[in-house]
């Protein structure tokens, strides 16, 4: 008999859906199995106001497949010009779920991000008052810091102090990628949680670099070493409610990945995210810990109800297409042209 597992419908607490003609593809993929998703605001023109987020939400909802009840959860992008009033408006709107902090220049579409984290402490105070979570891209963008050390440097220079300064502020340390981040999380207070992507659990920098640079794996935070990967697997499968699912699925057209001017940062996983997480938990002998990580701990942290229906995954292999359509272009997804050992079951 095929092995299978039924879990409460999961949510994705960190995804990039982009905008325009590609929304049809990204929204279809993410709504296959996730009930809700925290939608990142780093569009080419960042989503900085409630009005912009409201319009963006409508464009997403318009692309939902028929019968889908997928719910996009909207976020606002912090800049040096964000005001306390914006935080109050966000809270009053009942639309904005969180604010996202990108250190200026740290990743794709982060040029308008925050130049000096400490200068926006008054905004963090207001977020704590309004009970709006702060989502952090935890890497310094200081060019003198080695790209593999940027997350650890962010903890030392900013996060440790920030988390201790605002015990009432809910903070999500997004897409953690290092042993240092896991160590930080292990001693952090309960107001801090962390998301873990599927690609940081499945891969390390050897997958990206050994035998030739492979652009689908290039993302921020950059994949680290095997010891870091093992620390992340241990954290994700530990059953600790500090860690929950956030794919950071971040599509880029193949032409932007394979570009002589530089490779766009971001890995696309929405086409198979839950299947791949299940593979990792299975390999770690921790299928019993999957539901907490994927479906329970995120809603608890955000103060939202769990999804009421379930999904079923079966241990049955399928082949990922070489290329997926991305608006009028194509992209190369993670696992392109290779097998995945778990499938979503069509059974209700
Ligand atoms: C993301 C993107 O492409 O928007 N890229 C990435 O490498 N993860 C931005 C981000 O989350 O860092
Ligand atoms: Zn991201």
Image: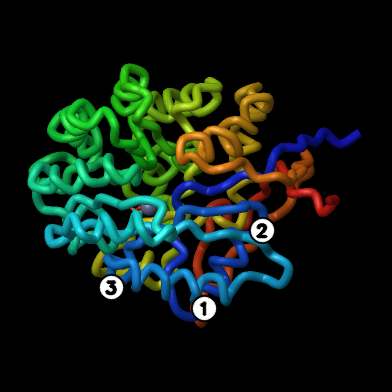
Q: Is residue 147 left or right of residue 184?
A: left
User: Which of the numbered marks, if any, corresponds to residue 45?
Assistant: 3
Residue 264, position in %: x, y? 33, 62
Front residue (pair 94, 160)? 94
Q: Is mark 1 within 8 Å of ligand 1?
A: no
Q: Which residue is mark 2?
A: 32
| Any part of residue 213 in sight | no
Q: Decide: few, some or many residues near mark 3? Use Cα within 10 Å; few <14, some 14-19, many ≥20.
A: few
Q: Is residue 20 above or below residue 158?
A: below
Q: Residue at horizontal 32%, vertical 37%?
A: 171
**From the viewer's perspective, is 93 left or right of 319?**
left
User: Distance from label 3 to label 1 (Cα)?
Assistant: 19 Å
- Of circles 2 and 1, which is in front? 2
For the image shown, how many numbered marks are present on the structure?
3
Q: Looking at the image, is 61 positioned above or below residue 301?
A: below
Residue situated in front as seen by the camera: 69 or 115: 69
Disc on the earlier residue, 2 or 3: 2
What SS does tag 2 mark? Answer: loop
Mark 1 sits on what residue? 327
Q: Residue at x 55, y 25 (%)?
A: 237
CA neighbours of label 2 inside 10 A, class few (<14), some (14 to 19), many (20+): some
Mark 1 crowd level (few <14, some 14–19, many ≥20, 10 Å Cα): some
Image vertical order of residue 82 relative to residue 318, above or below = below
The residues tagged by marks 2 and 1 sit, at their Cα atoms, a distance apart of 18 Å
Q: Quick check: can you spot residue 149?
A: yes
**x and y, in percent, of residue 8 in the image:** 69, 40
Q: Position of residue 79 (x, y in %)?
A: 18, 59
Tell which circle, 2 or 1, labels the residue nearer the N-terminal end. 2
Judge by depth and name the residue closer to the eye, 15 or 180: 15
**Residue drawn at (31%, 46%) of the image:** 130
Q: Nearest to the eye among marks 3 and 1: give it.
A: 3
Residue 114 lies left or right of residue 127; in this view the side is left
């Amino acid at each position: 008999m095929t092995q299978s597992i039924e879990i409460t419908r999961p949510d994705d607490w960190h995804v990039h859906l982009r905008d325009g003609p590609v929304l049809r593809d990204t929204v279809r993929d993410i709504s296959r199995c996730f009930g809700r998703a925290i939608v990142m605001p780093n569009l080419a023109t960042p989503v900085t106001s409630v009005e912009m987020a409201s319009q963006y939400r409508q464009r997403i909802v318009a692309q939902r497949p028929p019968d889908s009840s997928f719910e996009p959860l909207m976020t606002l992008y912090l800049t040096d010009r964000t005001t306390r009033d914006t935080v109050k408006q966000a809270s009053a709107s009942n639309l904005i779920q969180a604010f996202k902090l990108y250190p200026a220049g740290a990743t794709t579409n982060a040029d308008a991000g925050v130049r000096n984290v400490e200068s926006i402490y008054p905004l963090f105070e207001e977020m704590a008052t309004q009970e709006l979570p702060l989502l952090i891209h935890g890497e310094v963008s200081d060019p003198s810091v080695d790209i593999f050390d940027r997350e650890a440097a962010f903890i030392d220079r900013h996060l440790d102090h920030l988390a201790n300064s605002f015990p009432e502020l809910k903070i999500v340390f997004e897409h953690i990628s290092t042993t240092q981040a896991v160590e930080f999380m292990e001693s952090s207070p309960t107001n801090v949680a962390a998301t873990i992507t599927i690609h940081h659990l499945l891969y390390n920098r050897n997958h990206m670099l050994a035998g030739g640079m492979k652009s689908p794996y290039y993302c921020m935070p950059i994949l680290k070493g095997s010891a870091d990967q093992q620390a992340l697997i241990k954290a994700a499968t530990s059953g600790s409610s500090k860690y929950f699912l956030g794919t950071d699925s971040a599509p880029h057209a193949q032409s932007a990945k394979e570009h002589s001017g530089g490779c766009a940062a971001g890995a696309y996983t929405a086409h198979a995210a839950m299947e791949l997480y299940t593979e990792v938990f299975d390999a770690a002998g921790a299928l019993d810990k999957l539901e907490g990580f994927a479906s329970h701990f995120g809603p608890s942290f955000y103060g939202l109800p769990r999804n009421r229906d379930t999904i079923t995954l079966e241990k049955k292999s399928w082949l990922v297409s070489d290329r997926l359509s991305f608006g009028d272009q194509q992209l190369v997804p993670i696992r392109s042209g290779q097998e995945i050992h778990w499938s979503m079951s069509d059974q209700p």
